[in-house]
Amino acid sequence: MLNKKSIEDIDVSGKKVLVRCDFNVPLKDGVITDPKRIVEALPTIKYLMSHGAKVILCSHLGRPKGTFNMDYSLAPVAAKLSELLGREVPLAKDVVGSDAQSKAAALSDGDVMLIENVRFHAEEEKNDPVFSKELASLAEIYVNDAFGTAHRAHSSTAGVAAYLPAVCGYLIQKEIKIMGDALNNPVRPFVAILGGAKVSDKIGVINNLLTKADTIIIGGAMAYTFFKANGFSIGTSLVEDDKIDLAIELQQKAKENGVQLILPIDNRAGDKYAPDCHDITVDSDNIPDGYMGLDIGPKTEQMFADAVKDAGTVVWNGPMGVSEWDKFASGTRSVAKAIADSSAISIIGGGDSAAAVEKLGFADKMTHISTGGGASLEFLEGLELPGIAALNDK
Ligand code: AMP
């Protein structure tokens, strides 16, 4: 999976190149509130333009449910791209229709254009071969640079690769290099920090990391299923009763593999699931009736920071508590700070942990912040991502 051709391994000069980007940007009243995903796509786009390619960009935006719905038009993206590239980026009115075809045919070397939201066609998410072929017919080379959707087998992320030479762009190349090295050849000690709502979402990751990491730290609501499995009273904390046996099994497996599995020793708990609840700090074996654990406690913050301090590699996915509420954001903040302060190779999974790191201003202290939440989780699970598997091997 890791030895894929990139844009530098193929001659793009004078060729029409279809580039799948992740331009699924947040919008408010038609205005882009965070252009990060567009900015991150620029190195690949600029490389292709400066090497004489005729660049045809594509992406999805939101969930238009397979119909042309102009609320999900890529027009704001075209405008932002024009601004960032300092030249007009024309937007075709359609995806594979006559406007896209004629605009693509009229491109000169070094030109760039955008086609409309690929999800205006229901065939996209079905990975329909006819639609994939129509997309492919716009170009002579396919580049996938949308890591955020690489775990989906859709026409523009995977299907199209069957009909064209297919390589990755810089974003995907960076993701697979950094995360691949961390999994297969980590600088040790390798510490993984997992949080978030559900054990069930992270079973695959925990299982895979149990064969690779030296230490696995568990925080977030997930921890309470482990506590219950270990016979602690957990009050009204979130628990997955059907995962209790699994929590016992995972702890057993950690012991067998010589992996240190660390659970919180104290917690911040609230008397209801609300930001204005009454909160207390309690040890993990002593959460009172009527209280639910909503964040790790101060002793745990220190313990987790100590585990991170001398790490060679840290991978983090998922918040330590309900970090959306200030009262329960401390654990997530302290983990972000501990990682930022350590000299370890630090890899932050997408989603909540990436948002926390950015909000706290630690982004430039991390080695890598993944551009895909779901995709990075699947990568850490050791699964083959269809959007990467479809690309040509070196
Ligand atoms: P995930 O999508 O699995 O990464 O989970 C993120 C969500 O988990 C966030 O919305 C958090 O509010 C939630 N979460 C984390 N810790 C807890 C907790 N102790 N109790 C309830 N929800 C939590």
Image: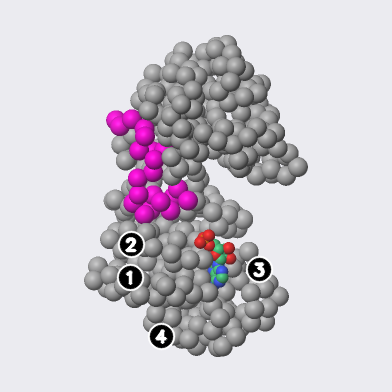
Point out the image quarter for the C terminus. Answer: top left
Give the amino acid at mark 2: Asn
Q: Residue at x 53, y 74 (%)?
A: 238
Q: Nearer the viewer, residue 292 or 352?
A: 292
- How far apart are the alpha carbons under marks 3 and 1? 32 Å
Residue 326: mark: 3
Q: Which residue is mark 1?
A: 250
Mark 3: which amino acid?
Asp
Q: Are marks 2 and 1 in contact (CB under 8 Å)?
A: yes
**Numbered mark located on residue 44 in the image:** none
The quadrant holding residue 81 is top right
Q: Secondary structure at mark 3?
A: helix
Earlier in the chain: of badge 2 and badge 1, it is: 2
Which of marks 2 and 3 precedes in the sequence? 2
Between marks 2 and 1, how big is the CA–CA gap?
A: 7 Å
Q: How many marks can you see? A: 4
Q: CA distance from mark 4 to mark 1?
A: 15 Å
Residue 322, placed above or below residue 91:
below
Question: For this rendering, which residue is in front, 289 or 315?
Answer: 289
Tell me the quadrant of ligand 1: bottom right
Q: Is residue 157 left or right of residue 22?
A: left
Q: Residue furthest right?
A: 29
Q: Please tell me in which quadrant of the rendered image residue 210 appears.
A: bottom left
Residue at the spot of label 4: 231
CA gap, disc 3 and disc 2: 32 Å
Q: Position of residue 111 (x, y in %)?
A: 56, 17
The residue beneath circle 2 is 207
Q: Which mark sits nearer the N-terminus, 4 or 2?
A: 2
Where is residue 59 drawn, in percent x and y?
Answer: 55, 34
Tag 4: Cα neighbours inside 10 Å, few (<14), some, or many (≥20)?
A: few
**Mark 3 sits near ligand 1, with its Cβ under 8 Å away:** no
- Residue 289, x across and y down, in percent: 56, 88
